[in-house]
Image (tube, rainbow, N blue to C red):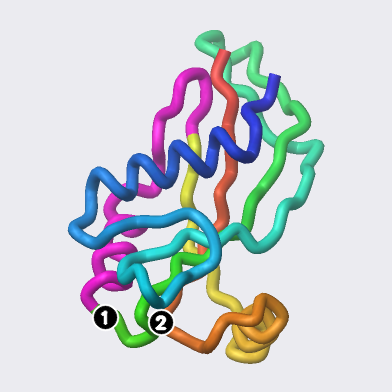
């Protein structure tokens, strides 16, 4: 059974929060609470995610999903907070959570795509980094 989106986001939140100096929140940024906010942007189901078995001949595909997230600085110019978040993503691209491996992969949207995300979410433009979350199930 695939882990829930909430449990995956909670795992990422807990891991990032324990490893960087800035306060870490899950959800839309609130300028009254400085730190780094992890904002889920998009959810995509996939039928080609991989199940990794201890027996390599038994590896197979299974339904899975990808979550596109944004790590956002709060306040908008909090360079130290976003820098620690980016460093974390760079240094820890893989998280282990129970029977799943969570891969965090930086994503590089165009300026137009970023602007559309901020405008549609009603968030003022600010320092941010986008990344994709993929869950790989181990058996």
Residue 20 appears left or right of 36: left
Task: Tell me if mark 2 has few (under 14), some (14-19) or many (20+) residues whose alpha carbon lies within 10 angstroms of its own.
Answer: some
The residue located at (32%, 67%) in the rendering is 35
Question: 31 or 120, which lies in front?
Answer: 31
Front one among 18 and 94: 18
In this rendering, the count of numbered labels is: 2
Asked if labels 1 and 2 touch by Cβ distance under 8 angstroms, the answer is yes
Q: Quadrant of residue 24?
A: bottom left
> What kind of element bears circle 2?
loop
Looking at the rendering, the stretch of residues picked out in magenta corresponds to: 80-101
* Residue 86 highlighted magenta (yes or no): yes
Mark 1 lies on a secondary structure that is helix
Closer to the N terminus: mark 2 or mark 1?
A: 1
Name the residue that disc number 1 marks. Answer: 79
Residue lying at 43% horizontally and 44% vertically, measured from the top left: 12
Quadrant, the C terminus: top right
Question: Picture coordinates of residue 136 (x, y %)?
Answer: 58, 32
In the figure, is residue 39 to the left or right of 83?
A: right
Task: Give the distance between the C-alpha atoms of the residues marked 2 and 1, in whole angstroms.
Answer: 7 Å
Residue sticking out furthest to the front: 32
Residue 65 falls inside the magenta stretch: no
Q: Label 2 belongs to which residue?
A: 127
In the image, residue 21 above or below residue 126: above
Q: Which mark is residue 1?
A: none
Residue under the image location 51 percent in, 19 percent down: 99
Residue 133 x, y percent position in the rendering: 56, 49
Q: Nearer the viewer, residue 110 or 14?
A: 14
Location of the N terminus (image quadrant): top right
């Amino acid at each position: 059974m695939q882990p829930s989106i909430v449990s995956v986001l909670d795992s990422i939140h807990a891991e990032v929060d324990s490893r960087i100096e800035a306060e870490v929140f899950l959800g839309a940024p609130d300028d009254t609470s400085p730190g780094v906010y992890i904002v889920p942007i998009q959810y995509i189901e996939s039928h080609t995610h991989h199940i990794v078995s201890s027996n390599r001949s038994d590896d197979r595909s299974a339904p899975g999903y990808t979550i596109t997230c944004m790590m956002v600085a709060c306040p908008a110019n909090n360079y130290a907070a976003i820098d620690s978040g980016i460093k974390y993503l760079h240094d820890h691209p893989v998280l282990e959570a129970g029977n799943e491996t969570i891969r965090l992969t930086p994503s590089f949207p165009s300026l137009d795509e970023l602007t559309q995300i901020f405008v549609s979410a009603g968030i003022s433009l600010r320092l941010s980094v986008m990344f994709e979350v993929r869950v790989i199930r181990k058996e």
